[in-house]
Amino acid sequence: MVVCSFKSSTHWLDVLLSEKFYNACIIHEEAKKNEKNIYCLDCCMSLCPHCLNPHRPHRLLQIRRYVYHDVIRLDDAAKLIDCSSVQSYISNSAKVVFLKQRPQTRNCRGSGNICSTCDRSLQDPYLFCSLYCKIDYVLRSEGGLSKYLLECKFMSLPESGLDDGQMTPDSVLEPAGSTRTSSGSCGFGEVGCLALACTATTEIVRKKRSSMSAFRTACRPAFSPVSEISAGLMNRRKGTPHRAPLY
């Protein structure tokens, strides 16, 4: 993925879109729950929960993850940048948006609506599948982001406390305000590619199925089934009969 080059006034955004989150913190490598899933907008750096104390007065943004891709809550993103036309998804009763562009596992280009940057299938009337795609498009078409950036002087972590941010396939993301459609769905029916069928979600399903198949193979009994044993006994040739001598 090519990282956009921003001006110094948007250095925080440049770092946010290029940072690798959920890596183990090297300062607290021996501690539990040391994944770097917090971003400090004032220091332009990723943090783990053990790094928080010096940054408490700063603007902090929690990064969440769904199937190995970073997402942030739409409410948080909307305080920093104009998120209009970016497709949002619902998870755990909260709207989220993908932070970065995602690789596509298959060609989902169809007759439906597609992302203006990466051609990923979208639900109408969205134009971008992630914040990165919108920013990349705006920079290429308008040359600047000044009118899309918002002034945010305060941003704190959730009052309920910092969660691990991991969204498992059990909490499947669904497009906000989704409707059933077959247009551009790549044969999936319903929302298909529009929902996330072209993301790693399908890979997770395949992994689960292959794991179950491997489990069944490994647990297969080493001896022959009862029916096979019975058939073998019936097909066994009888030996020479032993008759009593004649007197």
Image (cartoon, rainbow, N blue to C red):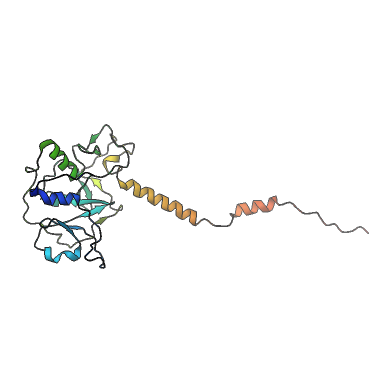
Vertical side of 2 occupied by 93: above or below: below
Vertical side of 113 occupied by 63: above or below: below
Vertical side of 178 occupied by 39: above or below: below
Q: Within the image, what quadrant is residue 30 found in? A: bottom left
Q: Is residue 217 visible?
A: yes
Q: Nearer the viewer, residue 189 or 32?
A: 32
Q: How many circles with numbers are drawn on the protein?
A: 0
Q: What residue appears at the point 19 percent right and 66 percent down from the top-left corner? A: 50
Looking at the image, the residue that sits furthest to the top is 111
Q: What residue appears at the point 20 percent right and 38 percent down from the top-left corner? A: 117
Q: Nearer the viewer, residue 176 or 157?
A: 157
Q: Within the image, what quadrant is residue 87 found in? A: top left
How far across and how far down the image is residue 2, in percent? 21, 44
Q: Nearer the viewer, residue 51 or 171?
A: 51
Q: Is residue 80 left or right of residue 180?
A: left
How far across and how far down the image is residue 241, in percent? 81, 55
Looking at the image, the residue that sits furthest to the bottom is 30
How far across and how far down the image is residue 218, in percent? 49, 56
Q: Quadrant of the N terminus?
A: top left
Q: Is residue 75 visible?
A: no
How far across and how far down the image is residue 217, in percent? 49, 53
Looking at the image, the residue that sits furthest to the right is 247
Q: Quadrant of the C terminus?
A: bottom right
Q: Is residue 199 left or right of residue 222?
A: left
Vertical side of 81 occupied by 242: above or below: below
